[in-house]
Image (cartoon, rainbow, N blue to C red):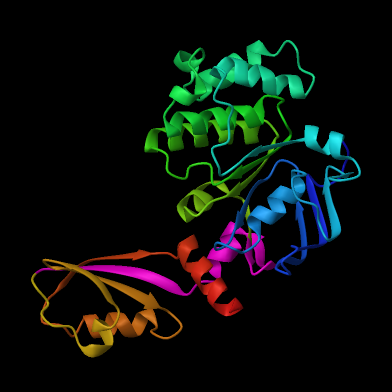
Amino acid sequence: MTDSPAIHIAGLRKIYGSGHLALAGVDLDVHAGEFFGLLGPNGAGKSSLINILAGIVHRSSGVAEIFGFDVERDFRRSRQLLGVVPQELAYDPFFTVREFLRMQSGYFGLRHNDDWLDELMMELDLTDKANANLRALSGGMKRRVLIAQALVHKPPVVVLDEPTAGVDVELRQGLWRFMRRYNEEGHTVILTTHYLEEAEELCQRIAILQQGRIVALDSKDALLRTSSWRVLTVTFDRDPGTLPPELAELLTGAAENTRVLRIDAQRSPLGDVLAQLQTLPAQILDLHLQEPRLEDAFTDILGQGR
């Protein structure tokens, strides 16, 4: 391994034959050992970027390297360094789980890989399905097999492309426990997801793509600080009655003596909101202020990019 970034992308462009500009000059370095989030709305260019790294799509121009190896000129070496869990459930229905994973190992020249395959199947709760035919598995089980497939050669860089889309909570929690451990052992993990709470919990740095361009790239904490939104939950000793118009427009929830307000601190300073709450014909018993979530920062950043 070199001292190069795990992923180095510079001036990366992709124009499809239809003339669609999917990537418009992306610059991005992902450091070795990071748990990195690549976020964006549908059509932002995430899949194009991932497919270029995986060698599935040819770039139009620019640089794309994995640990210093160009993804096209050094395809064989760069492919050995990368594992990709795709969005789509693509598998060969004529093999059992173990046969499928052994076949994938063979693509990387690994002939005696059963100990690692057994560990993968155990971690992903596939052990009792090892001899089951792939076509007999549920969608969630097939998703687990694809995750194992991406990891058969213990790649130093793993891309998880919407890995928990449509899967149950148990798989989601188990997958994140395993991927945290994999990352803590020094591997680089890149996550794309529409479940922003996952990215907020797992990722150290985050890039946000919009219309083929990176519109934000920073640590998770720094991105959270860019949002001025707060959620204030107020509990009164009795029903506070009808809220004045300035507070009513902030109201997002109400239950008995509790009111939930979503506040843009730039337009409605918290001190002003509290002062208005104290004028209501009910005593405040409890206040809870929820700090910004990644969803708030994400929405703000995309709104600025339009």
| Position of 183 relative to 287 (above/below) | above
Question: Residue visible at 31% across and 82% down?
Answer: 273
Q: Quadrant of the N terminus?
A: top right
Query: Who is closer to the viewer here, 4 or 85?
Result: 85
Q: Is residue 246 left or right of residue 32?
A: left
Establish if 141 lies above or below 176. Answer: above
Q: Nearer the viewer, residue 266 or 283?
A: 266
Quadrant hosting residue 140 = top left
Q: Residue furthest bottom?
A: 245
Q: Position of residue 20 (x, y in %)?
A: 70, 68
Q: Residue at x 58, y 62 (%)?
A: 40
| Total numbered labels | 0
In percent of width and height, residue 241 lies at 10, 80
The residue sitting at the left extreme is 238
Q: Residue furthest right?
A: 73
Quarter assignment of residue 106: top right
Residue 247, position in %: x, y? 26, 83
Q: Residue at x 81, y 47 (%)?
A: 5
Horizontal placement of 275 versus 184: left or right? left
Quadrant, the C terminus: bottom right
Give the vertical position of 139 relative to 217 (above or below): above
Query: Magenta residues: mostly which secondary structure?
Result: strand
Q: Which residues are magenta?
A: 208-237
Q: Is 113 contained in the magenta span?
A: no
Q: Compared with residue 63, is residue 237 higher up or lower down, i.e. above or below? A: below
Which residue corresponds to the image point at 58% horizontal and 21% vertical from the top-left?
Answer: 120
- Can residue 31 be seen in this snapshot? no
